[in-house]
Image: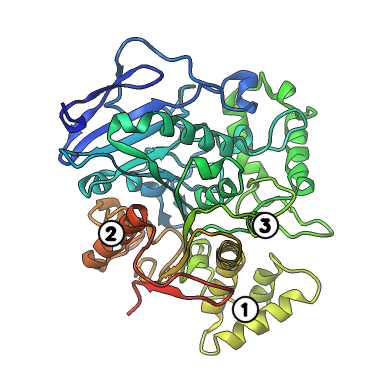
């Protein structure tokens, strides 16, 4: 009996029963690690104890504790963030979409790590539906991981980057089980977007990774987004102040998740500048990876042998400006203040001058978007691509996504997140359309979605997306969706 003909599969933890869809079978809410509870929320992920009865994998399960985040200003972001916190301790889970395999043998596997600023998001977001991947012969997996304080708060008696450790645990589970779902464990591509992309970049620097994945895609991430331990301790100190404790895994063990979630908004806007470092993510989130050196610097000193596709969007910064209605009133002071998020001393003035020289026709609003996007994602993408191209025997490919939405009176453009409906081939999702929705009111080109989705599949299948490899600091960048 072929994998396409069955819906019940026995994993290393127990049997699961999925649900058929038009192009194969979907298995939802499969645990890859034990539920993180009590002090265990701040420990390395542990193996799941397993189950003996057939587990119903036809319905979505709980998500990581998180604050409600379904909009940026006037922009509806619910398709991206999903249903928010769906309570239940057993949330370190995977969703798996398998194609109808027939006699084709094991198929390529793609594992997606969601974004959400390290504090929100889940594998239940409508944008992350993997049906199109299964339709086209690829096994698609989406991963939940710990967020916020359990996932990323720096603590003296706990490992850092516990959310990243969760993704590594998921990859190990996948390597040991995915052939049972028709996937090829030797042909696994890890990809992520935004915070998920930063996690993918961090995972590339882990010594065990060459044995776990073959390829990686970093969408709108940065190789320079990690906090120093000193910066991370600023967040820890604030958490201690808010809770009136000395923060540690021990002292946080009995504090319920709801109280930790309620704390997140009070950490927003925390000044993480130190005498030697600016906030690498410009203040948009209080959490990130914690590391003594940036992933791009670590990657420059190692040969992973992993093929990498990496890129950003043309108007990354507009997501954080247009929905707030601040672009039309942009002043020279606003430009310098935006640059100052990533510079110190005379740096902001010089940065504005340099960006203006590179974009002489840009008005203030456009220039502000460029400066913010470059500081958050684009500059770190360039660094990561150059580091990988210089050190790795794996190939490096860069892209820039440039299709512009007319949402928010045309100001959203090719913002952060805009490539996601194209990668997942989800243009028909109703909640993406409207004057305050991601894709705006003008129908986006379906052919472009087919092309981009197919490009991601081609890279996963062959390691070559269809354009020249990137070499050096000024190598080839493929423009996707530009006129």
Left or right: where does residue 36 sit relative to residue 301? left
Q: Which residue is mark 1?
A: 331
Neighbour tally class for label 2: few under 14, some 14-19, many 20 plus, Cα within 10 Å:
some
Q: Nearer the viewer, residue 62 or 304?
A: 304
Indicate which disc, 1 or 2, sits on the residue closer to the N terminus: 1
Residue ID at (26%, 26%): 58
Of tags 3 and 1, the one toward the viewer is 3
From mark 3 to mark 1, how far is it between C-alphas?
A: 41 Å
Q: Which residue is mark 3?
A: 301
**Can residue 60 be spotted in the picture?**
no
* Mark 3 residue element: loop
Q: Are marks 1 and 2 in contact (CB under 8 Å)?
A: no
Of tags 1 and 2, the one toward the viewer is 2
Q: Which residue is mark 2?
A: 454
From mark 2 to mark 3, how far is it between C-alphas?
A: 32 Å
Q: Which quadrant would residue 364 be assigned to in this image? A: bottom right
Residue ID at (69%, 75%): 336
Q: Nearer the viewer, residue 385 or 33?
A: 385
**Can residue 449 be spotted in the picture?**
yes
View extreme (front): residue? 393
Q: Nearer the viewer, residue 297 or 64?
A: 297
Residue 398, how many percent across, how many down?
Answer: 47, 67
Residue 370, how many percent across, how many down?
Answer: 55, 74
* Mark 2 residue element: helix
Quadrant assignment for the C terminus = bottom left
Q: Which quadrant would residue 382 be assigned to in this image? A: bottom right
Quadrant assignment for the N terminus = top left
Of tags 2 and 3, the one toward the viewer is 3
Which label sits on residue 207?
none
């Amino acid at each position: 009996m072929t994998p396409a003909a069955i819906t019940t599969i026995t994993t290393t933890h127990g049997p699961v029963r999925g649900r058929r869809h038009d192009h194969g079978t979907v298995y939802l809410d499969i645990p890859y690690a034990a539920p993180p509870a009590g002090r265990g929320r701040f420990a390395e992920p542990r193996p799941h104890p397993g189950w003996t009865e057939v587990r119903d994998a036809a319905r979505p399960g709980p998500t990581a504790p998180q604050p409600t985040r379904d909009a940026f200003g006037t922009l509806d972001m619910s398709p991206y963030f999903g249903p928010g916190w769906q309570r239940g301790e057993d949330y370190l889970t995977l969703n798996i979409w398998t194609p109808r395999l027939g006699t084709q043998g094991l198929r390529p596997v793609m594992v997606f790590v969601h974004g959400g600023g390290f504090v929100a998001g889940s594998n239940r977001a409508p944008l992350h539906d993997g049906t199109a991947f299964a339709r086209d012969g690829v096994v698609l997996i989406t991963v939940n991981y710990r967020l916020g304080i359990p996932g990323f708060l720096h603590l003296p008696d706990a490992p850092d980057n516990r959310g990243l450790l969760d993704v590594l645990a998921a990859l190990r589970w996948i390597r040991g089980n995915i052939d049972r779902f028709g996937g090829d464990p030797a042909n696994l591509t890890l990809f992520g977007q935004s915070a998920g992309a930063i996690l993918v970049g961090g995972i590339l620097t882990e010594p065990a990774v060459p044995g776990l994945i073959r390829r990686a895609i970093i969408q709108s991430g940065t190789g320079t987004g990690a906090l120093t331990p000193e910066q991370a301790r600023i967040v820890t100190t604030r958490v201690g102040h808010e809770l009136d404790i000395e923060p540690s895994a021990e002292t946080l063990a009995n504090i319920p998740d709801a109280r930790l979630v309620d704390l997140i908004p009070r950490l927003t806007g925390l000044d993480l500048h130190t005498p030697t470092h600016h906030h690498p993510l410009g203040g948009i989130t209080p959490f990130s990876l914690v590391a003594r050196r940036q992933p791009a610097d670590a990657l420059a000193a190692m040969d992973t042998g992993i093929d990498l596709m990496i890129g950003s969007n043309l108007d990354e910064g507009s997501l954080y400006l247009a929905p707030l209605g601040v672009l039309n009133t942009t002043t020279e002071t606003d430009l310098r203040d935006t640059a100052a998020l990533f510079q110190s001393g005379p740096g902001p003035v010089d940065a504005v001058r340099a960006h203006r020289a590179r974009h002489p026709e840009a008005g203030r609003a456009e220039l502000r978007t460029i400066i913010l996007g470059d500081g958050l994602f684009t500059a770190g993408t360039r660094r990561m691509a150059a580091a990988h191209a210089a050190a790795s025997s794996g190939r490096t490919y860069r892209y820039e996504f440039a299709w512009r939405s007319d949402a928010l009176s045309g100001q959203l453009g090719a913002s952060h997140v805009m490539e996601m409906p194209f990668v997942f081939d989800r243009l028909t999702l109703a909640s993406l359309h409207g004057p305050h929705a991601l894709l705006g009111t003008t129908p986006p080109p379906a052919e472009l979605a087919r092309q981009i989705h197919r490009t991601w599949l081609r890279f996963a299948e062959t390691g070559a997306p269809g354009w020249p490899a990137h070499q050096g600091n000024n190598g080839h960048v493929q423009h996707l969706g530009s006129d």
